[in-house]
Image (tube, coloured by chain):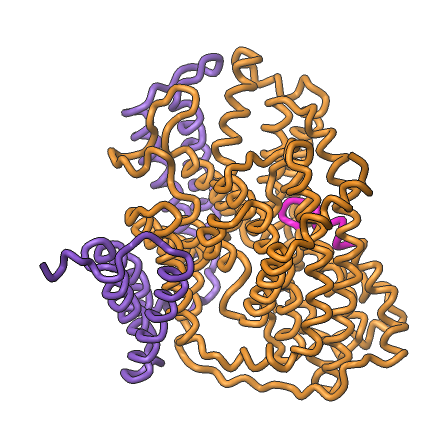
Chain colours: A purple, B orange
Amino acid sequence: MTWNRADVAAGLIFLGIGSVLAAYALATLEIGSAAAMGPGFFPLALCVILVVLGAGILFGARNDEAEPAAPVNWRAVIFVMAAPIAFGMTLRSLGLVPSLVIAMTLAVTASRTIGLLKGAAIVAGMTAFCVAVFYYGLRVPVELVNSGLFS
Amino acid sequence: MGILDGILLGFSQAATPTALLFCLIGVLLGTLIGVLPGIGPSATIAMLLPITLGLDPLTALIMLAGIYYGAQYGGSITAILVNLPGEPSTAVTAIDGYQMARQGRAGSALAISAIGSFVAGTIATVVLAVASPALSQVALKFGAPEYFALTLLGIVLVVVLSRGSLLKGLAMATFGLLLGQVGTDVFTSDTRFTFGLDDLRSGVSFIAVSVGVFGIAEILRNLEQDSTIPRALHKINRLMPTREDFRRSVGPILRGTFLGSLLGVLPGGGAFLSSFASYAVEKRFSRHPEEFGKGAIEGVAGPESANNAGAQTSFIPMLTLGVPSNAVMALMIGAMVVQGIQPGPRVIVTQPELFWGLVASMWIGNAMLVVLNLPLVGAWVSMLRIPYGILFPGILAFSCIGTFSANGSTMELYILAAAGLAGYIFTRIGCDAAPFLLGFVLGPMVEEHFRRAMLISEGNLGVFFERPISAVLMLSVVVLALLTFVPSLLSTRKVVFSNADD
């Protein structure tokens, strides 16, 4: 028997989300009744629907072949995800400019087509551009470089 | 207020220097991202949402709307010249448009597509102006059961009319609804699904989720083919179509406008479905169907008019009912909420300047597009030489700072990363993000109406079938749900969407 792997994954994901959240709702929220609904009634109903749909998708995945898909570019996934996380962790402590340099360095590392020189140029250009637009233009309330950093 | 008064009010609002400037920025940006295949209107609008917070509501909406219909114009440029649809809605244009370009008739195809889009945009704007006040009058009489039934119908229609498996679409919508439950319950003030995180008390940030699911996930998808592909461009000789081209285009433009205006209103419709339906109609009614696929001007004129008309009229349900018909409209609803406007039928009554200003700006924006884009077509095409390697770090930087600046919270950046990863996983497992975003936006509203209805009826589900309007809406949901299990319909749907992928 062949299984459509994308559909199996989708079914399991929805089943998982539905049952975990249902358990969480049951543990933390008052459910109530249809006439006097508690905060947990509607979420629980949605969880049940999600579990049913997940099971349905899983059932439909039998005897089916998934369409061939391009391989996942893990390097891109890791570095692109790292950029906003690093930006969030360093923005307050280092300031906008160093934080942007770090995030953009991670970003250009994500693509194999960008060499060292081109990458450096993109990092510098993007940082300058974003500082101009967001700091001087839109006046986003952050420090350019954290003033407490050198004291 | 009469329609004429409304239109006058609208032009007085939309013709101010600020409004004109942001309308121009919107349509230029829209054309740009329409031309560039790597980035679409959903991602752009999501990314720019935080920036529009500083603008007044009308200016913000004018700019965001300009991006959406501007993208329809831009997408056709790439479709015709490089056989690469910049937007999904221009995929059909590429079939005959590119053949015309190969025969040295690129100029005619581009001009007809711009003129058709403008005619369609003008007519659809009138439809919007006439239909919306009437529809909102009806909607004002709606109670909780009607609203619940209406949103349910909207969600189901979006799932049926969008690509991919129906079960997956429904699951995505349900997941979106669930995510919309996170935060403080409006009835009891209990916190739900916050997992002890204070940042989640006010709910999961709409901006972070939409930027992640559209902007970041799109980057990951594009980087799967991480290489630089040189593209062949066709030369444009003359822009003026021949008299024969004009004669053959009149019918398709008008039919396309009609079809597009109609399909645009449907949830899940909008530009994409409209252009596809128009192509099918033109091919069937043409006296020389054998020319289709080999450079028939009708195959450009019809779909191009239809997608623009559809883009305009998809604003109708959003503006009159507060129910978005596609992902872009869901983002527009989000933009209104962030601006402190409660979307729904009251908007036209309480904020006429907002509604009519937006309507008038659409006509102005369409005029700008047709005047600017034909002479500038060379400049737009040169944008295609921008490699994606430069584009995506920029998108990433804008997404990060934009998301942060919306609330000044770094927590949002982690949600952004998580939403980006989730959005990418969705595509990998064949799930469309549009129903998810729709559910997420509508989540709080759906629950509120459901609970109100249940309070009125003391827990009797029959209330949805006892009131006439609600009963009709609910029956449509049931019929639609049953129809989707009819095998013949399933296979037609499959054919329609697989054709659209070519």
Vertical arrangement, residue B286 with respect to residue A16, above or below = below
- Given residues B301 and B293, the one toward you in this image is B301
Query: Which residue lies at the image location 68% right of the left edge and 67% below the top edge?
Result: B92
| Viewport quadrant of the N terminus of chain B | top right
Which residue is the extreme one toward the front? B17
- Given residues B443 and B25, the one toward you in this image is B25
Query: Which residue lies at the image location 43% right of the left edge and 24% below the top edge?
Result: B186
Q: Which residues are magenta?
A: B259-269
Which residue is the extreme one toward the left? A151
| Left or right: B80 as drawn, with respect to B284 | left
Which residue is the extreme one toward the top? B458
| Viewport quadrant of the C terminus of chain B | bottom right
Query: Which residue lies at the image location 63% right of the left edge and 63% below the top edge?
Result: B70
- Residue B371 spot, x, y in % from top left: 72, 70
Query: Which residue lies at the image location 76% right of the left edge and 79% below the top edge?
Result: B295
Write down the quadrant of residue A130 in the picture. bottom left
Q: Is residue B261 magenta?
A: yes
- Given residues A72 and B422, the one toward you in this image is B422
- Residue B366 spot, x, y in % from top left: 71, 61
Residue B491 appears in view: yes
Residue A5 appears in view: no
- Given residues B167 and B226, the one toward you in this image is B226
Q: Main secondary structure of the magenta part?
A: helix
Q: Is residue B136 magenta?
A: no
- Residue B134 spot, x, y in % from top left: 77, 35
